[in-house]
Amino acid sequence: SSDERREESRSFKNWNLFRASDFVFWILASLFYVTLLFTKSRSGFIAVWISLIIFWAVRLLFAVYYQHQSQNRSQMQATAYICDQANKLIGIFIFSFIFITFLFQSPFDQINRFTLPELTKNLQPRTSNREPPTKPVGSSIIDVGITESGKIREIVWKGAIEVFRHFPLTGSGVETFAFAYYKYRPAEHNMTSEWDFLYNKAHNEYLNYAATTGIFGLGSYLLIIIVFIWWNIKRLKVQNHLDFGFDLNLWILTFGLSAGWLSILITNFFGFSVVVIQLFFFLIPAISFVLFSTEIKYVSVMLNSFQHLKGIPKQVRDDSNNQHNLTINNHQLAIISLLLFVICY
């Protein structure tokens, strides 16, 4: 119909591969990625690439899915085109990040062997016959002088597990890791270059919650993570019923936030949450819930506008209207209650 064609045309106009705003985002993303490389953060590097791959893979699956649908063919083809354009844009970002890594190296020596600085190093003429310095072998301060940070974190994690074993239910107390750790500190920590450092965090957010808040604190923290991941998986399944009036731009935003949120879970495994990261940990799910409510409202309006067309199941219209009329549903009430419990705890 004419309404379908107008909606499809609007979708095509809203998606241009080389918009000025996309170029600005590309510049900012490249600068942020260069900053990440200069920090030499291995956990941040891994988290960025895992979240990018997950985001791109899901977008690619959606494009393939919509290209092979037989119902609402024109609308499906328009959505598939938008998905394809978005995947091309994401591909440009990923290629740019790979090229930046090639120029500035990564935090991993295994990858740096294939970067420009390492490849050109062998081409430079030698000024002397002296052998290049070799790295000392060993794990203690006696052998190498400076202990590798990964080795130190393994030792601290052992101490955090010991604290949890002695206080399994409630932990040693909120923000008491600096006191509890030195009571169960492994002896091998004394053989590191940071033997006299004060450790007030376990350098693993999950072990830190386990050591200081016990099963109750860690369980609440993991429950928030599981609920939000389950909610996102459920939303992916819901999209099969939102082919007509589906706001793809809004979906890309919400799923992009979710992919970024997964990177927090990865970095928290090798470190701890500072104030900004902890705010993102709770605000990103909250923003996603609000955006999803906006999407449901949008879909409800679209379905009501085109409810005379064939191919839109009555159950989908009824479900959309019911969700639109509810001020707060049971899932939202459960999540709010969970957040209040964690805050009060």
Image (cartoon, rainbow, N blue to C red):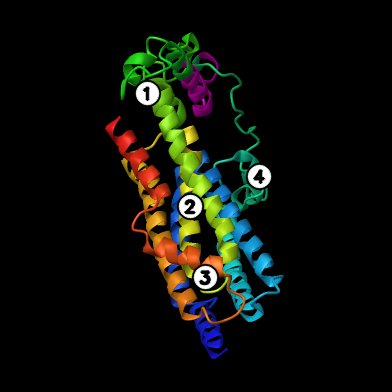
Looking at the image, can residue 213 be seen? Answer: yes
Residue 121 placement (x, y as % from top left): 63, 47
What's the CA distance linking mark 4 and mark 3? 46 Å
Looking at the image, can residue 92 be seen? Answer: no
Residues marked 3 and 1 touching at CB (< 8 Å): no
Helix, strand, or loop for circle 3?
loop
In this image, 78 relative to 288: left or right?
Answer: right
> Looking at the picture, does residue 145 appear above or below residue 339?
above
Disc 2 crowd rating (10 Å Cα; few below 14, some 14-19, many 20+) is: some
Kindly report which numbered mark, 4 or 1, lies closer to the viewer in this rendering: 1
| Residue beneath disc 4 | 113
What's the CA distance linking mark 2 and mark 1? 26 Å
- Residue with the most extreme left position: 344
| Residue beneath disc 2 | 258
Helix, strand, or loop for circle 2?
helix
Instruction: Name the mark on residue 246.
Output: 3
